[in-house]
Each structure stands twice: as C-alpha cells, then as structure tokens.
Image (cartoon, rainbow, N blue to C red):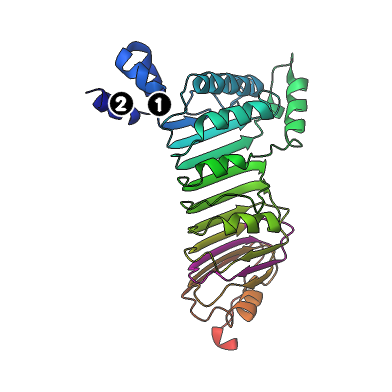
Amino acid sequence: MQDIWHHIHSLLPLRDAACVACVSHSFRSSWSCFPNLSLTRETLGLDDGMDGLSCPCEVARDLARKTDHILKNHSGIGVKALKLEICDFPFFNTSCDLDRWLHIAVKPGIEELDLQLIVSHAALCREKSHAALCRKISQKSHATVYNFPCSLLDGSGKSIQQLYLNNCALRPTVALGRLRSLTSLNFFYVRITENELRCLFSSSIALEKLTLRSCDELFFLEIPSLLQQLSHLVVEECRNLEVIKSKAPHLYSFGYRGTLVRLSLGDSLQNLYIDASDQDVVHHACADLLDVVPNLEALEISSYYPVYSYSLDYY
C-alpha cells in the first residue's frame, strides 16, 4: 500500500506534492524521495520581478532560500529529473552551494539534468532604497562563471539521458567516464573549447541530438564518426565559429543561425535550416552547399537582409 502512495505522490506537481506532504504522514516520508525536482521561480510561486511590483533581487534571494530548504530535506534517493534555476550567481548562492545542491540530487539513476544560471531583471528594480545595489548585482552576475563539476557526470554516467546547461563552464578531460545513456545535449552560453567538446563526444556515443547556442570558445566544430546515432544538430550564434565539419554517418537535420561559416555536413543530411545575417545568403548557400549535400530534401533559408531568388538550375 505504501508503494502505491509513493507512486501517486510522485505524479503530482512539485508545489502540490509539497503541500500534501505537509498534512499527510504517508506522503511526508515519500517527499524525501520525490523524483521530479523542478526548482524554478515559476514552480515555487515566485514573481520574476519584471512587472515592477517586486524586487528582482528579493525574488532571487527567495529562490535560493527555498531551493536550499527543499534540497536539505531531500534524501537524494530516487531523483529522476532535476531542474535548477539559479538567479544572479554568485550573490545569493556560491559555487559551494551549487556544488552541494547538485551532489545531493545528481546520483546514479538520474535521467534528466537542467541547470540554468540566469541574470534576473535586477537592473529594472524600482525600489529606491536598494536600486543601486540591484544594478551592481546585475552587472557583476554577467561576469561571474560557475564551473560545472564534471565528477557529477562520472557518477551518473550510466543513467543520464538529457543534459541542459545554461551560462556556465564545462571542462571535461579524457578521464571523463562513459555517458552511455546520454541522447540529448543542449548547451547555451556554455564555455567549452573544441578539445573539451571532443572529450565529451568520446564519452557520449549514444548521442542523438546536439544543440550549441552562444558557445563562444568554439572556433572549429568537428562531429566525429563515432557518434553513429546523431541525427539532429543545431548551432546558433557561436560568434567565433569558423568551420563546422560533421562525420556523423546518420546526421539527418541541421539548423544554423549566425554569420555563415564553412560547412561540411556529409551525404546523409536531408533537412537544412539556415538563418544567416549575411547579404545574399541564398546565393552563397546554394553555391556552396548543393554539391556537398547531394541527398538534401528540404532547404529553408532566412536572413535579416532582402532574400533574392535564383533558379536552382543556375547552380
């Protein structure tokens, strides 16, 4: 019977599960093993501060306090999905806090990890008594980088399937363990070099979907042939990127946004989406790509500049 109550409790949204645990002894014990932890401003009922009615810094402080309270009371057992939203790091939570929270919840058995370090709208604070402090917090938060502990991936490598990182640094080495279940990787404003990304690829041979957004330490992106399962690749606004080369044998779909770079995508590609800031992007895309993607079935191009049409027979 207890297992049934645990299962019912695990299906509830986080706030409902917490409320039920406060009034029921049966659910209270299962709260310490609650499997789906989504700790964000929305799920914890906190205003995002954009309406001007609440101070963004106070919202960020409340988020850190509630996150700390919830994770301190969690056993770390049975977590399947963890989503952490961190506002204005490192003012209301330090690297030690983040490391401690992650080590509580990220254990063998976890399947999804979503870590988002965001800068709140502190610069919009209207409270005269601390508006200057809020602006200072907003400015400094842009300059501080959290180093994600790669040791977490070693411990959860057998089970983790989806990894989403936003606004941090990831420095994997050749010593990184096998991430044998990882199928989806999404990096946004992540500081990682091509050599470090290569180490990550060598450990993630089951990868199916890869998204890289605003990863500005990348200059040359090479997708190795060992990523046999990779079918979807998205690269957006990686400002220093010059070359994208894929040897993945089953790459099916590629989406790109930014200044046009040299592309080598392989024969398997069928869907290509380009949103480029270059003038006459249609001419350049067709002239450079049609010969190297012989099995292309769908091509979608957009640009900030006027798009001129050409007959494909021209190429």
Residue 67 within the segment the image draws in magenta: no
What amino acid is at disc 1?
Cys
Q: Which quarter of the figure is the N terminus placed in?
A: top left
Mark 2 highlights which residue?
6
Residue drawn at point x = 64 percent, y = 24 percent:
56
Residue 33 shows which numbered tag? Answer: 1
Residue reaching furthest left? 1
Whether residue 208 is situated above or below residue 284 in the rendered picture = above
Left or right of residue 240: residue 99: left
Percent position (x, y) of residue 254?
Answer: 54, 65
Q: Position of residue 211 (x, y in %)?
A: 56, 55
In magenta, the rendered stretch is 236-258
Labels 2 and 1: the sequence-earlier one:
2
At which x and y percent is residue 96? 67, 27
Left/right placement of residue 279 relative to residue 297 reads right
- Residue 79 shown left or right of residue 227 in the figure: left
Q: Nearer the viewer, residue 307 or 72?
A: 72
